Image (cartoon, rainbow, N blue to C red):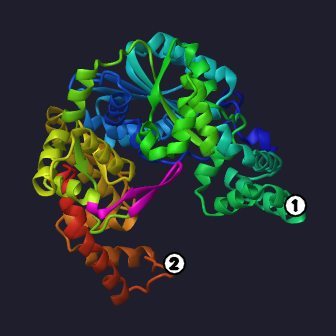
Amino acid sequence: MSGAASRGPDWARGYVLDVPYVSQFTHDLTPEHLALCCGIAGYTVPDLSQPFRWLDLGCGAGVTPALLGPLYPHAEFWGVDFNPDHIGHAEALAASVGASNVQFRDCGFAELDAEGLPQFDFVVMHGVLSWVGAAARAEAMAFLRRHLKRGGIVFASYNCVPGWAASVPLRDLLAQAFDLAHGTSHDRMAAAVDVAETVLRLNPRLTEANPALADRLVSLRGQDHRYIAHEYLVREWDLFHHRDIVRLMADARLSWIGPGSVVDALPELSLTPEIQAHLAEIADPAERETRRDILLGAQFRRDLFTRGRQRAPLDVQRLWGQQVRFASLSITEELPGEVDGPAGAIAVSEERFRPYLDALAKGPASVAEIAAAVGQRNGAVPLERCFVDLLTLVAAGLARTAPPESVVAAALPASQAANRTLLAQAVAGRSAPALLLPVTGSAVTLDDVEQLLLGHWVAGRDPVTAVAASLRQRNQHISTADGEPVPHGAATEAALAKVFQITRTQRIPLLQTLGALA
């Protein structure tokens, strides 16, 4: 059987079907994150306490919509993917967590009208536009024209030309070698990487002229095969400038709101003063964002679009900026000092940011409440500076915004029940994709060992002894910092005890504060 034929039947349009996409929860797609980005861009913020409909076009294994169901019980969540295996996984996950307000459809974009889908307040497309051809993109735009409500919001993420351009020869080489190889997709992926390494070894000048080729190839060896299959080996694979996507969305009568990323939405976090000054001279927003991507070598973009959502008056923007609530995600005793940003490091110093996390230690609070608490200790803090500092913590992964209190209260029972189920599944040998955090309207991913420790703790068992016995029974090992396996017995129990000490003293209290555990 030839490589091209094994990609799947004609209806798959060259998509890899026998390797499922990575099963993960994506915070950027959550209603709370989309509402935050709308507010930062100056548009009216969706009221998430009211019923709404949310759709994931190209949902993959459906983890995000399945887990959003219990977090927003008054809303409807839908997922569409043309891979039947993905939808089977998604439906099973939704059923296991009791998400009765989540539905999935196994079909292509052109078939959606026949499925009787309603109109939606939110439509998300994570990476999809880069991995389908022009015909499927046109079908997606036609669907948005018919099924996005006036004032509705579209999130689209996609691969960018500037950051990917240097690696296009490697991608083409991998795709060609994949097509010529035989066996399963896993076999053919390994063979494709071998071929690419051979080609670069035979002609070192290729990497001398383009060092990105070698760097990206080295990184592939350690990456998940599921990611490689869907990022590099689908037949349709396109790169875009921001202006290209703006023009595409115009076909569906959609206008750009702003970035779908907190870092990208705040120039002070993502751009040097020199770059900000240069971009300020470009009047057209689409060209300005495209120039920004070129300057930063952007590899991936997240954008928000709307049909008819209005900009909020300045007084409404200011009021929202005071009332939006934040919650801490930090379990670290020390702040990182700095985190990577698009144009360099973003400072996250103890002196400036610790007071905010201390103010959030007991639970979520509004910007006005946080500014007052910080001001009592450190002197008055302007509300605008407080807001930007809190968004910096969001960009650093140390905080998130929180939905309205009524939404959190309604989500707590179902979300905690779902987490008990997910942890029980982890103990039984099926890793949980994430744990729900009702206070943030989102979820968090934990590593397998911490899932096991939490699962046994929730079940009332001694976590260290139980996990050590489970690992021994499965002939699995935990590893040292150097990647060496820890021997079963006393050494494993000692290592697990250290991990659980952090889990017990830091992780569990935080999960309880965020509503994940009772």
Q: Is residue 348 magenta?
A: yes
**Which stretch did the figure color magenta?**
337-351
Whether residue 200 is visible? yes
Left or right of 233? Residue 442 is: left
Q: Between marks 1 and 2, how big is the CA–CA gap?
A: 34 Å
- N-term mark: 1 or 2: 1
Does residue 355 sit above or below 457 in this rendering?
above
Asked whether 88 or 339 is in front, the reply is: 339
Q: Sort mark 1 into few (<14), some (14-19) or many (20+) by Cα contacts within 10 Å.
A: few
Q: Amino acid at mark 2?
A: Gly
Q: To which residue does mark 1 refer? A: 205
Query: Horizontal and vertical percent for residue 366?
Result: 17, 40
Q: Is residue 241 left or right of residue 314?
A: right
Residue holding disc 2: 483
- Mark linked to residue 377: none
Residue at image point 55% right, 41% down: 275
Residue drawn at x 35%, y 36% as measured from the top left = 33
The amino acid at mark 1 is Arg
